[in-house]
Every structure is written in structure tokens, then in C-alpha cells.
Amino acid sequence: MSAQELSPQDTVRTPLMTLDGVSQVFSTKAGPIRAVDNIDLSINPGEVLCLVGESGSGKTTAARMAAGLARPTSGQVAFDGTDIWSLKRNDFTAFRRSVQYVHQDPYASLNPTRTILQTITAPLFKHGLVKSKKAAAERAVELLTKVDLTPAENYLSKYPHQLSGGQRQRVAVARALTLDPKLIIADESTSMLDVSIRISVLAMLGRLRDDLGVGFLFITHDLAIAKYFGWRGKTAVMYLGRIVEFGPTPKIINAPTHPYTRALIDAIPEPDPDLTKTKGRESLRSLEIPSLAHLPSGCSFHPRCPQFEDGLCDGAIPELVTIRSGQSAACHVVARDGVPGVGDGGRPDEPGA
Amino acid sequence: MVTTSTSASGRAVRGGQGKPLLSIRDFKVEYRTGSGTTVQAVRGVDLDLFPGESLALVGESGCGKTTFGLGLLRLLPRLGHASGQVTFNRGDGTEIDVLGLDGRDLRSFRWRDAAMVFQGAMNAFNPVLKIRAHMHDTMRAHTKASKQEIEDRAGELLRLVRLEPSRVMDSYPHELSGGMRQRVLIAMSLLLEPEVLILDEPTTALDILTQRSVVDVLHEVRERLGFSMIFISHDLSLAAELADRVATMYAGRIIETGGVRDMFYKPRHPYTLGLIKAVPPIVGDLPDMESIPGGPPSLASLPPGCTFNPRCKYATEECKEIDPPLIPITDEPGDYHEVACIHSKDVHLDRRVQDEMGTAS
């Protein structure tokens, strides 16, 4: 696998990464916990896929499996068409190089005893990509410039504690870029940053996405961030280990179909006093999130869902079906009746599937 | 110091007279940082809180928001020292000099006149005591209420924040979810019917739906009980939702204050404008977003002149020389819209929507 391999633009694109029926079950004293239950995802080269959901929805577990940090209990994680768990040692190393992870907390993810130079060059030496210290330092300067830490020379000899949160997160991104990855998994990478800094880090990530053609699996609990970063990509909404809605980001944000996605979008306060006070809000039937150890029968959202129908929703687990072109949802009621109250011309293409 | 004797009936008087409930003048907080040096975290704040009003204090981390809240309730750590003038108006004509209170008077000011809801709901509880014990302790420390009265009052407030008293009262804090803990904390802070509630980042670290339930609860209890509220948040959307008036803090000072609509639609300080532009709205197309370069200055070495000038795109040479005072805006109607910027006439919010693909279906 060479790093400069380009994705064919016109021919059928092989997805960079696919998760096919992937589950992760943790066995605990309280019984098995299905943290991720049978999810399918695919990311094309240079594409952004946002994974949104509340805490405990399985976003991070899914990301860890995509990064090869956890082995799925069942299902297949494939990179460039090959199951990553069938790869030989060398190929697995190459996979690891192609997929990089940026963690949430830049205070914890950088080694406090290493200078920025050491942090950034460590992967280069580890994978034998540079021959001399001088070449490594030059590469480090180049990378720091890419993440807007300029003049880069000033940062090389600094330690993480000398940097602000935003700067640290930029270093973490620079480190992820050292090995020319094809996919970056960003797990809540901006949620610890202040609002003003968040946007500049996101803008920087967006530039990397456009200039370097890096694919992103972007995990966030904040739909506003998913909207900003993944507007031209796709968004998957997770609830209690399952994907409940999937589609192009603008559709998910402006024309959500699943009652859970709708509740999420409605619940978010807007930075606009008139808008936020007039936003329509359906109240949920319950505020409590069910425990993963005792999932409700049928659709796991049914105890909270305002559209709950007795006998229908608590029976079978709803499948993810296409509601309108490119947008699918796992909801019995929406699959049967179509989308209530959204009149933007997007009529359901295949009701019921 | 209580200047005249308080009568119980006085507490019933809420609103009216146009007199501020809390009047803050030249409020400063200094922290000692060892070897005789101090850092000023709050550098002279003038603010009035009127009865029934909800005031949001917004700004980045490190702007002195929390220090300001703690200072008002005299909850600063030992190395902190508050100065200035904070007058609390009990409504029966009694005026209290908050910074001069001590001993019993201070204890009765806290909880009864003003209460605080802290950010980390878990840390605000004693982990080895049940919620019932928290409620009883608080009430017994401040009133002579009987056990039954305390039970009734606690139950009433818990129901108000949409919790089931029979379930919650016998739980330990760790047995409750984050949103439930936050709501219990709100109920507890209202036990003694304070006139002012200070909330420090009340919904930060909560999930979206949980945050919504806390916000709804706050709306509801405020409507029912009519207390005034100062809430501290870095989340502008929350300010838009909950506040009547917004004050932006930067480097220990208030640099703009005004009605919520004025502040969000016609911000006149480049910093407020920057904060608004950095928060993407959820509904609608992708708007034009902008970040504020750099970060807040260190309070130990503030830049000369306007403290925002190194990050400000409107900054001129003049900005490096004078630190502008907070003055009312005169070129536009609006009440109490004040700004500390010499270029405020040039600052306008216009929110363009990015022309992007992906909107068409």
C-alpha cells in the first residue's frame, strides 16, 4: 500500500473503509452489553462521515473497531476491501499507518515528558520513514506549518504544558498526519476546546480534508459541529449501539426523519433568541436513557418516542430502510407512514421497503 | 452588614420600584499568587440585576466568569480577595452590603437571598449522604422547619424539577444520572426561596436531550417562582434561550451588555460579534463562520490599551493606548445596550449563508 495512491474519480470507487454488520459485545457481571449492535458503515476516500449520538450510544466503540484498536465480536471491518483482521503482520502495520486516531483530550493524549519535536518525529522513526534527525525535524516543521502552528521552529522544543488546548490539539493532528494517513478518526476532537478556537481547528481539519484528500470518520455529540464539518459528507446517528438514521448531512440536519434525530435537532438551543424560543419541540415520553444491559424490546427508542405505537414499536427491531433517496432510518412508524410534517418535496421513495 | 431589621413579610415583595435587586459597582477580585504578587481576575465590574431578570454572563474560559460568580456569593478560595461595592436589596427596603457580611449574616445571605448551582453536579454533593440528608441539612442549618415541613418542601421542589421524590430522596448522588443530579441541585438551591440564583455552566457536560430537560426545568421554575438568575456559560445558544439580558466578559471586565435581542442581532463589540460568529446554528443552511484568532490574554500580563486589541480585526493604533470604558450606545435605540469599544460604530453582524452544494436534493 503506497501512500500516494490516488482514488479513481470516475470508475466505481472502492470504499476506503467498510464496517459490515459489526457488533461489539462486552461481557460483564450484569450480563452481555451490546455496545455496538450490527452496524454497517462505509467511508469513501476523501469523504467525511460524521457519527453522532449521545454518550453511551457506541460511537467511540465503533471508532475503536474502525481503527483496529478493538476486535469486533462479529462482523467485518475492511480497509481497501480487505478484512483487517485477516491481514499479515506487515500489512496490518501498513493499515495502522493509513488510519490515524485523534483523541478527545489533548491534555491526556500527548506525552508530557516529550517535546513537540519528539512527539511528532516518534512515528517517523518507528516506521523507518526518515533516515536522519535532520530530515525528521524538517518534516516536523512542515507538519506543524500544515496545522497552522507557525512559526513552527518556535514550537519544536516546547513541552505540551507550555501550549494551550487548541495548540495541543493541533499538535495531535500534526502527529496523526506524520504517516500520510488516508483516514483520520477524530473522536470528539474539538469538544474540549473553547468555541472560538473550535472553529479554527475545524477549519484547519477541513483544509486537510480538501487539500490532502484525507477521509474522516468524525465523531461528535454536537450536531452543530457535525453540520459544520460534515456538510458535504454523510452523517450517521447512533442510539444505544445502533444506527437509527443515515444520510447526507444537510438532510439529517434540515429534514430528519427518525423521531430520535428529530428530538435531538429540536432540543438544541440556537444562538438566536427568536429562533430558539419559537422552535417547535415535541416532548419525549421519558427522560431516562435505558441501560444497555436491559435494552427495551423492539425499537430501543420506543419508551421515549413521541410516536410510539403499542404493539408495533415494542415488537421487532426496526431495520434501517430507505425513506427517501440517500436517507435511511430505522423506525417502524416512519417506514410505514413516511415523514410527518416535513414538506420539502422529499416524499418517501420506498415506503416500507 | 444588615442596615435595618429584616421582616419575614418583606420577602414577598418581588419586582416593582425599578430598583435593582443586586447592584454591583467597581467589583474586583484579586488572587494572591505568592511572593507578594497578585493577579486581578475581575477588574472592575459594574452591573445591576433587576428583580425577575435573567442575566447571562458569556465569554471564553479564563475571562473571569466563574470568579465573578464566586465573588458575589463570597465563596472565593482563601487566596482570592473581592473588593468594590455589592448591594443586595431585600425588597423590604433593607439593603445589604454583601462584601461586608460576616458570620451569621453571611450565612443567612447565602441560600436565603442568593444561592449557587455549581458546574460539576457530582462534586457539589457529599457522596456518602443520601439526597434526603442533603435536603434536611440545608433546611436545618437555615430554618427551624420540622421534619415533615422539610419533607414536604423538598418533595414539592423535586416534583417541580420533574423528579419523583420517593425515588430520589433515598438515593445516593452516584445512583442518579447527570441530568437528574443537576435537577436535584436546582431543587436544593431553591429550598430557601432565594431571590437570586447563580448558575455556573448549568448544562455543560450534559447530553443534548438531558440539557434540554434541564433548560425546560429552569424555564418552568423561574416562571413559577419568579427569582432572578445570573447564569454563567460559554454556550451562547444557551444564553439566547434563557437570558433576558446578556453581558460579555473579557479579561475580567464586562465589555458589552444589552438585551438579549440587541446582543444577538446587533452586537457592537468585536468580541461579542466573534463569539456569535463562532457558534453555528443548527437549522438552515451552512452559515459563514469565523473564529477569533488567538486566545484570551494572561491576566498577569494584559496587553496595553483595550485588552482585546491583539485579536481584534478592527484594532487601530488608538486601541493600543486607551482601554475604553463601558458606555451606552447612543446611535441606536435600545435600553441599556452598553459597549466598551471605540470602533463600535463599525461593528455590524451580517450573517451570510455559504453558497455550497449539497443543499439541493
Image: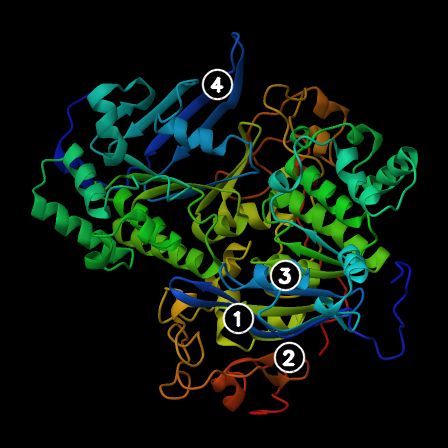
- Residue B92 position, x and y percent, is 20, 32
Q: Amino acid at mark 3?
A: Ala
B309 displayed left or right of B134: right
Question: Which residue is label 3 attached to?
Answer: A63
Separation of residues labelled 4 and 1 (CA atoms): 46 Å
> Which numbered mark, 3 or 4, is in the foreground of this view?
3
Q: Amino acid at mark 2?
A: Gln
**Tags 3 and 1 in contact by the CB under 8 Å rule?**
no
Q: Amino acid at mark 4?
A: Tyr
Please, which chain is the residue tagged with disc 3 on?
A
Instruction: Label 4, secondary structure: give it.
Output: strand
Give me the disc on residue B237: none
Question: Which residue is label 1 attached to?
Answer: A261
Same-chain status of marks 4 and 2: no
For residue A97, above or below residue B130: below
A26 displayed left or right of A41: left
Instruction: Identify which residue, B165 or B196, lies in the foreground.
Output: B165
B242 displayed left or right of B89: right
Question: Which residue is label 4 attached to?
Answer: B31
Please tell me in which quadrant of the rendered image residue B292 appears. Answer: top right
**Tags 2 and 3 in contact by the CB under 8 Å rule?**
no
Separation of residues labelled 3 and 1 (CA atoms): 20 Å
Instruction: Label 1, secondary structure: give it.
Output: helix
Q: Earlier in the sequence, mark 1 or mark 2?
A: 1
